[in-house]
Amino acid sequence: MSDTRDDVHEIVIVGSGVAGLSAAVYAARADLEPLVLEGPEPGGQLTLTTEVENYLGFPEGVGGMELIQQGKAQASRFGAEFTHGTVEGTDLEERPFELELSTGDTVRTRSLIVATGASARWVGAENEDELMGYGLSTCATCDGAFHRGDDVLVIGGGDSAMEEALFLAKFADSVTVVHRRDELRASDIMSRRALEHDSIEFRWNTELLEIHGSQETGVTGATLVSHPDGHPTAKLDEDVTHEDVEVGGVFYGVGHVPNTNFLEATSVDLDDEGYLVTRDGMTTETAVEGVFGAGDVMDPDYRQAITAAGTGSMAALDAEDWLETTDPVIEPVTPMANSSD
């Protein structure tokens, strides 16, 4: 892709997960010829999921990678263009917007949809790269039903971990929460629900060191380490206790990080955790006119493929409406006031 400083796109979509692809389908069908920037991990988190059973229209389930590939083919069919490149610099102070890419190219666009998602935090356990999606998961809602009758581990001590544990308790024989401290960080109500649940146990001052299994067998067990003062993986050269346990699944519940670094120096509003803030009401509009959000990057609560796809379509429709009522001339940008301010 050559430098496009002299070209101005009607719409650029940053991110190629299910939110970005849904936005691309709608924008392409509106003859907006969207450019989709695929980023460092084309397809997003869904590509780490081997089987998706809760996406409407696939009664037998569908592989995460297959769903992404079909979405890309659908968007391409209607005229969406795809290119690799991470946004490293952003000028949203004047229209058309300018995006500086890792490839050295400059992309100019009248409107922008941010669909960069949120990355789940991993804990650094041995074999997590190999087993992610094969019994190791960051989403109980997505994968919990695969573990009916299993013993499973949940790693973490905050609200995310408690939510994972409570959901998994509907399916698993037992749920063990592994936390590196001797008290939870979760809110009082979430802590109480998990602590009082008959099927949830807790391993305090304990961390996950290694996950056992293979892509053929799935997760078969794990090695845990513990120390009476907590944070045992930082004390491996001291007297820590090692224990191997047999489990059929491991779930990380240590939170997500929204991929919004490239927006930090702009007028787009981000919350304290870095999630993109949209205006009040059922809209994907942000504080900057012409910039819209879609998917997990603006959704810390649901984080589902189908909700991401829904907000992707909303963002494309919002962008289309905005483009139809906005003069295409270059002009300074005045951030919109958030009605919640």
Image (spheres, rainbow, N blue to C red):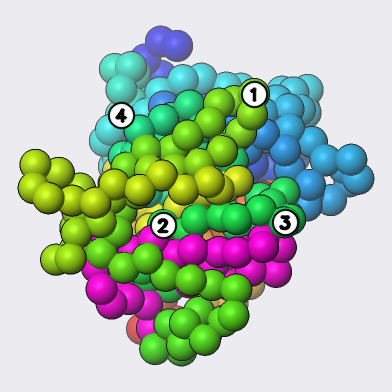
Label 3: element kind: loop
Q: Which mark sits nearer the N-terminus, 2 or 1?
A: 2
State the image coordinates of residue 154 (x, y, percent, origin top left): 47, 58
Residue 220, image x, y percentages: 56, 38
**Number of numbered callouts drawn:** 4
Residue matched to label 2: 155
Classify residue 218 by image quadrant: top right
Mark identifier at residue 300: none
Q: Does the magenta stretch include residue 271?
A: no
Could you tell me the amino acid type at mark 2? Ile
For the C terminus, give its image quadrant.
Answer: bottom left
Q: Which of marks 4 and 2 is nearer the N terminus?
A: 4
Q: Mark 1 points at which residue?
A: 216
For this orientation, the residue located farthest to the left is 238
Q: Do the residues labelled 4 and 2 touch (CB within 8 Å)?
A: no
Mark 1: few, some, or many residues within 10 Å (few <14, many ≥20)?
Answer: few
Q: Mark 4 points at which residue?
A: 100
Of marks 3 and 1, which one's residue comes earlier in the chain? 3
Q: Left or right: 26 with respect to 105?
A: right
Residue 245 in percent (x, y) is at 46, 48
Q: Which one is in front, 325 or 184?
A: 184
Q: Is residue 337 above or below residue 315?
A: below
Q: Which amino acid does label 1 sit on?
A: Glu
The magenta segment is: 160-187
